[in-house]
Image: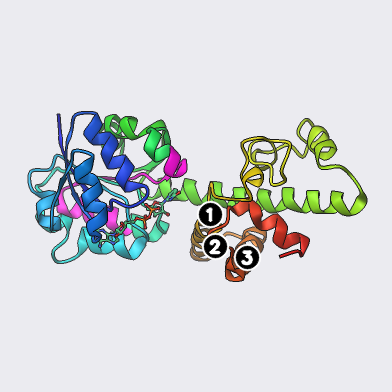
């Protein structure tokens, strides 16, 4: 069994760390929040007070932090993980961050003699608790192979997307597509309402026709056709609009630095920004249909 350091024990990191404990590993966890550390203790892990203690004796370190700036600081800061971990430690960053930060930290890992992968996830808090997350992984083959047994504990689908930063690239490309497709499906239902076409009729037709997509058939934004979709629970998340906006902004940043043309991605980011600013940041992202209908 391995000794695992874990940094960032929030909504996602907390249950992920708990699953590593459940699998029999020793988990030394750090978070700025005392409550998060208390939860780790309840789950059978060991809360520690510094990054140096996280790194001490660790075979593997997992991080699950809010954004690129946190990740850069935790890894490359003066008192960060690279300064304290022994050479060869495997580092897994599962935070969703910008591709540039992921690649910069991966380069610093190489210089420090560490193996590192970026491994952002989809599947949300439920997937984190159930150990059924999807991991999109970027990094060298050997680092991926070393990380896979640990990712298998926390997730169900583990995909190697290529070199450093490609896990983040996969995540933002997918979520940009999801944001755009959700708005498209919402617009189709709003138009159908105005034209007197029943929700269920549009669903029955489009779900087997060329308009078919995940946003329609798994996550339908109107109540009725898909029992499990948040539309049936007054748009309780699920996947909050604020999270979708974060990913769409990351996609726009990446489009701008790489020169990719993503006009619909830009429009989706602008619409989710308006939706969040209308007080709906905590609403499921499919709730944007109410905003598009104009009945907010
Ligand atoms: P969260 O805010 O619940 O957790 C982040 C934790 O990091 C907090 O407990 C915070 O105290 C801690 N933290 C921040 N800076 C720190 C530092 N310097 N040292 C130690 N701890 C620090 O967020 P979350 O929902 O768990 O999300 C974490 C990451 O996972 C984000 O990048 C998010 O985009 C991504 N993600 C979240 C979801 C979701 O449904 N919540 C889904 C997929 C991906």
Compared across the picture, whether 152 is left or right of 6 comes to right
Q: Please tell me in which quarter of the rendered image ligand 1 is found.
A: bottom left
User: Which quadrant does the N terminus fall into?
Assistant: top left
Magenta stretch: residue 105 in it? yes
Q: Earlier in the sequence, mark 1 or mark 2?
A: 1
Q: Secondary structure at mark 3?
A: helix
**Does any portion of residue 23 appear in the rendered image?**
yes
**Magenta-tinted stretch:** 104-126
Q: Secondary structure at mark 2?
A: loop
Please give the name of the residue rendered at 71% of the width and 65% of the height, measured from the top-left corner: 296
Residue corresponding to mark 3? 275
Does the CB distance between marks 3 and 2 fall below 8 Å? Answer: no
Q: Quadrant of residue 162?
A: top left
Compared across the picture, whether 47 is left or right of 159 comes to left
Q: Nearer the viewer, residue 12 or 157?
A: 12
Q: Earlier in the sequence, mark 3 or mark 1?
A: 1
How far apart, in angstroms, are the residues tagged by discs 3 and 1?
11 Å
Q: Which mark is residue 8?
A: none
Badge 1 residue CB within 8 Å of ligand 1: yes
Residue corresponding to mark 1? 240
Please state the horizontal and vertical placement of residue 20, each as a whole percent of the image: 25, 35
Compared across the picture, whether 237 is left or right of 201 comes to left
Q: Which mark is residue 281?
A: 2
**Does any portion of residue 115 appear in the rendered image?**
no
Does the CB distance between marks 1 and 2 fall below 8 Å? Answer: yes
How far apart, in angstroms, are the residues tagged by discs 1 and 2?
7 Å
72 versus 145 height, above or below: below
Q: Residues within 10 Å of mark 2 (few under 14, many from 20)?
A: some
Compared across the picture, whether 53 is left or right of 190 comes to left
Q: Residues within 10 Å of mark 3 (few under 14, many from 20)?
A: many
């Amino acid at each position: 069994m391995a000794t695992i350091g874990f940094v960032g024990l929030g909504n996602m990191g907390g249950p992920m760390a708990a699953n590593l404990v459940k699998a029999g590993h020793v988990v030394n966890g750090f978070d700025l929040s005392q409550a998060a550390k208390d939860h780790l203790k309840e789950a059978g892990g060991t809360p520690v007070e510094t990054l140096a203690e996280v790194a001490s004796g660790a075979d593997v370190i997992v991080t699950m932090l809010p954004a690129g700036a946190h990740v850069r600081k935790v890894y490359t800061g003066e008192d960060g993980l690279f300064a304290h971990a022994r050479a060869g430690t495997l580092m897994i960053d599962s935070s969703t961050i910008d591709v540039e930060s992921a690649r910069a930290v991966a380069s610093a890992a190489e210089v420090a003699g560490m193996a590192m992968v970026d491994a952002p996830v989809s599947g949300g808090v439920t997937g984190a608790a159930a150990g059924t997350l999807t991991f999109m992984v970027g990094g060298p083959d050997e680092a991926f192979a070393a990380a896979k047994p640990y990712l298998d504990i926390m997730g169900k689908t583990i995909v190697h997307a290529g070199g450093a930063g490609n896990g983040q690239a996969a995540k933002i490309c997918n979520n940009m597509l999801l944001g755009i497709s959700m708005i498209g499906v919402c617009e189709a239902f709003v138009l159908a309402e105005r034209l007197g076409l029943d929700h269920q009729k549009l669903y029955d037709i489009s779900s087997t026709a060329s308009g078919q997509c995940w946003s329609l058939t798994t996550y339908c934004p109107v109540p009725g056709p898909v029992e499990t979709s948040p539309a049936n629970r007054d748009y309780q998340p699920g996947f909050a609009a604020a999270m979708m906006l974060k990913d769409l902004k990351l996609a726009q940043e990446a489009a701008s630095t790489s020169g990719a043309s993503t006009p619909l991605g830009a429009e989706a980011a602008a619409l989710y920004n308006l939706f969040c600013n209308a007080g709906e940041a905590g609403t499921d992202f499919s709730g944007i249909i109410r905003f598009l209908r104009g009945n907010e």
